[in-house]
Image (cartoon, grey):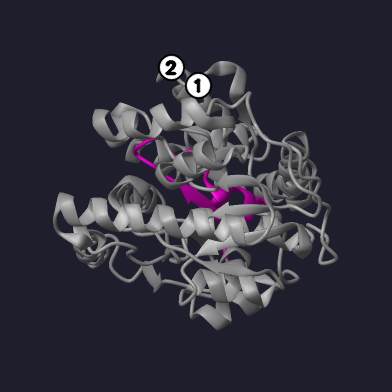
Amino acid sequence: MRPGRRRRAPDGARVALVMAHGKMAGAERILLELLTDTAPAGVVVCAPQASALAGEVEAIGHRVWDFSLPKLAEVGSAAGYARCLTGALGRLAALVRDEPVGVLHAFVANTVKAVAPVAAVTGIPALVSVHEMTDAAAIGGLRSRLQRWPATLTMAKITAVSQAVADRLVAAGYPADRVVVVHNGIARRAPRTPAAAARRQLGLPAEGLVIGVVGRLTRWKGQDVALEAFARFAQRHPDLPAHLAVAGGPFEASDVAYEQRLRQQAGRPPLAGRVHLLGHRQDAELVYDALDVVLVPSVEADPFPTVVLEAGLAGRPVVASALGGAGEAVVDGWTGLVTDPTADAFAGALERMVDPAWRARAGAVATVHVQRHFSRHRFAADLHRLWGDLGVPVGAGAQQTSDR
């Protein structure tokens, strides 16, 4: 069924948000931001019941329908994967029949393979949110086509997390008239902690310039570039008490070896004793509060790094890679700096960050910028509007909080 031929949503229908797995990664955290500002009666989340994501969803008052998608690597054979996928499709179709569902929302791109056929069979309008780079250059030609074809045939709207993602979707053949940019939005969960207290809790030096990198430890996030840039910066300023904090852990098994290489790199001069590997942290806001500067050194196109928004709400300027969508949230020269993803470029950008007055001004402007343009309320309202256009009006929840 093509997107223009849809049945009318029944009274009391809700939006079914479909997730592939229950691990807590970037898209899952953004989903929680959306749900916090969404009335529980209007949505349900399809995700593995026994998962970290399900627990978080239920903790903020929303319902979870047990659903998951198989992974070829875990199933072991193409035939077995096909059987498991067929079973998952039947499960999703049964779920949307049990209660009135008026919109199917594939909240991450790889759930299109389940949402598209169910939408085609049931006539339920559907949309997909693309948080990733999904063209052939990023994920391979075959996988890219397998996402694009069903999305083009069935999705009424395709939301892109940044203009950078939208441009690559259109270039890959997605219909430009259905691609719309919806930037993520977030809010602070806790008041700011004074920097001295935050550093004390994290075991970081009380004095001096503390630069940080926050996020999953994986090659394309560029933590190795940050370490090399900091080494060059430290050599230029031997008398400046400067330190680098790295917060994050490996997400996939393939990331573990990268983490080990980072530890080895951090243990060699001139980094030894100046680099603090904090591991995975649940209290990311505390980490930002302890820092003076935040680096986003992605060496591949980062669709729209939430780190930039989190740093802004903490009043911290960023130095961000020019690849991907980071530059859409950084006002270069005002809320931070956008530069090439090389150690030399990042080391050069850190020279501006030595000035505490410049950092304070940039951090203050960053906070206002994020609150104004990337608030959780604005983000949720944008998606509520799209759901309403597809026939299911959903209002804001009672848990709205300030983005301060």
Tell me if I can see residue 346 in this picture.
Answer: yes
Is 48 left or right of 396, judged from the image as shown? left
x and y percent of residue 26 in the render?
50, 55
Q: Where is residue 176? Give x, y as percent.
A: 56, 17
Going by the numbered disc 2, the residue's amino acid type is: Ala
Left or right: 363 in relation to 294:
right
Q: Quadrant of the C terminus?
A: bottom right
**Of 175 and 154, which appears nearest the observer?**
154
Horizontal side of 391 relative to 282 (left or right) equals right
The answer to which of 167 and 294 lies nearer the viewer is 167
Residue type (three-letter) at the residue carrying disc 1: Asp
- Under tag 1, what secondary structure? helix
> Which mark, by number, is residue 184?
none
Q: Is residue 322 above or below residue 55?
A: above
Establish if 49 lies above or below 179.
below
Q: Image quarter for residue 90?
A: bottom left
Residue 118 within the segment the image draws in magenta: no
Q: Secondary structure at mark 2?
A: helix
Q: Residue at x 75, y 64 (%)?
A: 40
Q: Position of residue 286 (x, y in %)?
A: 60, 71
Residue pointed to by mark 2: 171
Per the rendering, the mark at residue 167 is 1
Q: Nearer the viewer, residue 292 or 8?
A: 8
Direction left: furthest residue: 77
Report the magenta residues as a range: 291-312
Closer-to-camera residue (104/100): 100
**How far separated are the C-alphas under marks 1 and 2?**
6 Å
